[in-house]
């Protein structure tokens, strides 16, 4: 008798992947916000505009993604592998985006 599997397709839960992706994007945005708030005299919007005019927006995105490491480790500890995969996908997308900024 086949058992019912709650995952879709080849074992990847697309909802968990989407949740992880959104969580990864939000964690990166929060990391960038924290970096600008703590290490620059500007507010968030002005800081982004100045970083963009200096050509350093990619570096800001990279620094913001450091927070994704913490989120990824916590998700693995909680056995939320599908959501953790989404966080990795977000980091990959942000990396490719950084190459073109």
Image: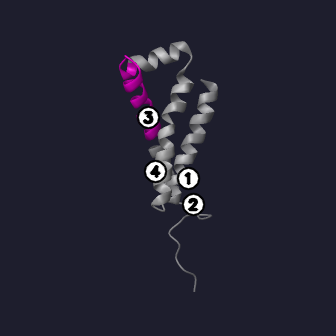
| Tag nearer the camera, 3 or 1 | 3
- Check disc 1 and report its element: helix, strand or loop: helix
Choose the circle earlier in sequence order: 3 or 4: 4
Q: For mark 2, what is the residue?
A: 12
Would residue 63 be counted in the magenta stretch?
no
State the image coordinates of residue 27 (x, y, percent, origin top left). Answer: 44, 40
Q: What separation in Å lies between label 2 and label 1 (alpha carbons)?
A: 9 Å
Choose the circle earlier in sequence order: 3 or 1: 3
- Check disc 4 and report its element: helix, strand or loop: helix
Q: What separation in Å lies between label 2 and label 3 (alpha carbons)?
A: 28 Å
Quadrant that contains the N terminus: bottom right
Magenta residue span: 25-45
Q: For mark 3, what is the residue?
A: 31
Choose the circle earlier in sequence order: 4 or 2: 2
* Residue in the image at 47% along x and 55% along y: 75
* Residue in the image at 50% along x and 52% along y: 73
Q: What separation in Å lies between label 3 and label 1 (alpha carbons)?
A: 19 Å
Is there CB contact under 8 Å for labels 4 and 2? Answer: no
Q: What separation in Å lies between label 4 and label 2 (alpha carbons)?
A: 13 Å
Is there CB contact under 8 Å for labels 2 and 1? Answer: yes
| Tag nearer the camera, 3 or 4 | 3
Choose the circle earlier in sequence order: 2 or 3: 2
Q: Nearer the viewer, residue 69 or 29?
A: 69
Q: For mark 4, what is the residue?
A: 19
Q: For mark 1, what is the residue?
A: 85
Q: Is residue 19 left or right of residue 89?
A: left
């Amino acid at each position: 008798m086949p058992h019912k599997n709650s995952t879709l397709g080849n074992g990847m839960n697309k909802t968990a992947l989407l949740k992880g992706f959104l969580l990864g994007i939000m964690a990166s945005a929060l990391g960038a916000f924290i970096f600008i708030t703590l290490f620059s005299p500007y507010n968030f919007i002005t800081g982004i505009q100045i970083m963009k005019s200096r050509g350093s927006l990619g570096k800001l995105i990279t620094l913001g993604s450091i927070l994704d490491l913490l989120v990824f480790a916590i998700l693995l500890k909680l056995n939320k592998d599908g959501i953790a995969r989404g966080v990795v996908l977000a980091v990959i997308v942000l990396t490719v985006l950084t190459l073109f900024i």
